[in-house]
Image (cartoon, rainbow, N blue to C red):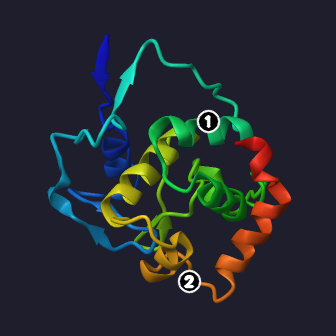
Amino acid sequence: MIKKIQLILITMLSVSVGLSSAFYSKDGNDINEDTYTNNTIQVVGDSAIISEEEIIIGDELTIENLALEMERVGIKHVDIVLSQAVLETGWFKCNNCSFQYNNLFGFIYKGKYLKYENWKESVAYYKWWQDQLYKDDGDYYAFLKKVGYATAPDYNEKLQSVGKELNIEEIL
């Protein structure tokens, strides 16, 4: 049986941070308000469809589970995005950052971190965000800077350093 994922995230975000009818970027700006209807993610390829036959990825947040979930939902440049999650959350150990809200990527709205029920919702939101803004297969580091995600001058260098520490080739 195949079912669409209901965007519980939108309802939850509406309650937790006062979102009305839009998704938001990492810097809190509106992103294309016409991309969803009735709190359901529009199907983009197969990223918004779950089949019961799919491999079940563990609920525990580990580098390996995160990489598998990113690949399952079709995130592009998993190696870089995995480094983003590690950097934004302090290797999943930060207590005073977005991680306390299961927000692996530091997305904010009106100066507050977006809140998710679990880390997989954060991954689903990243996939949606990426699909809305990343329209080519060019340099992903340049894309992150262009859209305002990489605000620190050395952000991309930090991502590359984390990627080397992760030894991503072995994980993927």
Above or below, 21 relative to 56: below
Q: Which sits in the foreground, 84 or 94? A: 84
- Residue that lies at the very extreme toward the bottom in this rendered image: 153
Q: Position of residue 24 (x, y in %)?
A: 35, 64
Q: Earlier in the sequence, mark 1 or mark 2?
A: 1
Between circles 1 and 2, the one closer to the viewer is: 1
Nearest to the observer: residue 6 or residue 97: 6
- Answer yes or no: is residue 118 visible: no
Q: SS of the residue at dot 2?
A: loop
- In the rendered image, which residue does mark 2 sit on? 151
Q: Quadrant of the C terminus?
A: top right
Name which residue type carries label 2: Thr
Residue shown at 19%/61% (left/top)?
Answer: 33
Q: Secondary structure at mark 1?
A: helix
In this image, 120 relative to 163: left or right?
left
Residue type at the position of mark 1: Leu
- Residue at the disc numbered 1: 68
Can residue 106 be seen here? The reply is yes
* Residue at the spot 82% in from the left edge and 53% down from the top edge: 167
- Front-most of residues 37 and 156: 156
Vertical arrangement, residue 154 with respect to residue 49, above or below: below
